[in-house]
Image (cartoon, grey):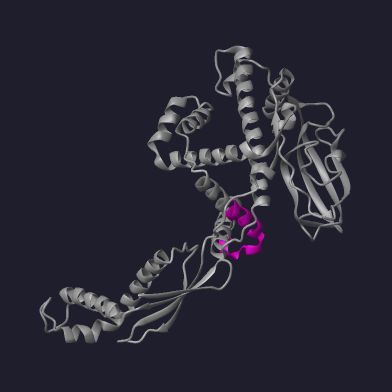
Amino acid sequence: MQVSVENTSALERRMTIGVPAERIEAEVNKRLQQTAQKAKIPGFRPGKVPMSVIRQRYEADARQEALGNVIQASFYEAVVEQKLNPAGAPSVEPKVFEKGKDLEYIATFEVFPEFEVTGLDTVAIERLSAEVADADLDKMLDVLRKQNTRFEVTERAAQNEDQLNIDFVGKVDGEVFAGGSAKGTQLVLGSGRMIPGFEDGLVGAKAGEERVLTLTFPEDYQNLDLAGKAAEFTVTVNTVSEPKLPELNEEFFAQFGIKETGIEGFRAEVRKNMERELRQAIKSKVKSQVMDGLLAANPIEVPKALLSNEVDRLRVQAVQQFGGNIKPDQLPAELFEEQAKRRVVLGLIVAEVVKQFDLKPDEDRVREMIQEMASAYQEPEQVVAWYYKNDQQLNEVRSVVLEEQVVDTVLQKAKVTDKAVSYEEAVKPVEAPQAD
């Protein structure tokens, strides 16, 4: 077999491969012999059909199949011989495909970039530290109570945070518009669910009262037919209900699976969950900075095949998340290209760090991570056992741990500044940069 390789770009390779005719004919004959053993042709017993008849009927198909298999096998042999690492399937262009002649074809493909991760000492990291203070715990208890607010009907006038049951009819230019009317809608005043002025216009209303609200749809309203237009809403208030926060008692604690431990036991459990969230938030922010630093220090070219595959994965995820009748390939690729490129480049860099520093998943850390995840469940031992019985889930945890070890490796060489902050600041999500 003859092989020559041409570098057509930083990552693209154009490989010309020649395969002796004898190898093709041997593959064709092997398939014809296999066919002869099972072919059913009128006038002949199975296995007794003359080869000339078999060849006449089946040679074209056998040759086509043989060529496909030989191309696949010879391409693999050639990339191994040339020590190339293809990043996707090749595009095959025939040069000589004639019977009796040596097979010759050109395979064009991309290879994975070869690089060494550098610049770890230039990566700057701000590592936060925080504690869960009693005030943070009290605030969280208030949040949990508000999330479980009950509403009780009252005779007084409506005020912010009350829940109203309303009927309304909306008109634009004196005509009722689609989607602008409803009956029996529950609306919490101050929730911002309706267009500006709607909820404010119902403050002070009582059950049985009708109010007419003259409003204007925002210029950036999602329905372009209504954006910026004046509208009139006739609203009938059916009931007004005031919020009632639940008491911190056994009944409330039981909603969270916590029984017979009283207020102190409940506070201890909530604190434990907050501390878990705090650890994860700090870890996530450090990891994000590490990955940004690795990207900045190691600009590499991305194989188009890997980028295309990642775009396809993101399209499928988007359809699964948002639903609808749209198909993944109907979503514009450019919507996902930036995110796909970041993920592909980071994947290549992280894999290279693992290789460069000979990292392997620390099994003690794997168990610790599983135990931490399991601690959020009522039967943690069963969750731990489940992970260790499911190879796929266990390997996913190992991958996460290995990524954490990559972060630790970078931190050992990076410029790290420690900063003490409040719990609230530590767990606050990082805001995405605004576009110019």
Is residue 416 depicted above or below 152 in this figure? below
Toward the viewer: 228 or 30?
Answer: 30
Toward the viewer: 400 or 389?
Answer: 400
Point out residue 257 in the picture as x, y percentages from the top left corner.
Answer: 55, 22
Point out residue 346 in the picture as x, y percentages from the top left corner.
Answer: 59, 51
Toward the viewer: 114 or 164?
Answer: 114
Is residue 249 depicted above or below 7 in this figure? above
Location of the C terminus by quadrant is bottom right
Taking the spot 67% from the left edge, 27% from the top edge, the residue there is 148
Left-right relation of 226 to 351: right
Point out residue 312 in the picture as x, y percentages from the top left corner.
Answer: 55, 60
Taking the spot 57% from the left edge, 13% from the top edge, the residue there is 261
Taking the spot 78% from the left edge, 31% from the top edge, the residue there is 162
**Which residues are the magenta region?**
325-346
Left-right relation of 106 to 163: left
Left-right relation of 228 to 185: right
* Magenta stretch holds residue 391: no
Is residue 70 depicted above or below 272 in this figure? below
Point out residue 20 in the picture as x, y percentages from the top left corner.
Answer: 32, 79
Is residue 352 depicted above or below 74 in this figure? above
Residue 318 visible in the shown view: no
Hey, which quadrant is residue 41 in on the image? bottom left
Location of the N terminus by quadrant is bottom left
Hey, which quadrant is residue 209 in on the image? top right
* Magenta stretch holds residue 344: yes
Secondary structure mostly taken by the magenta-highlighted segment of the chain:
helix
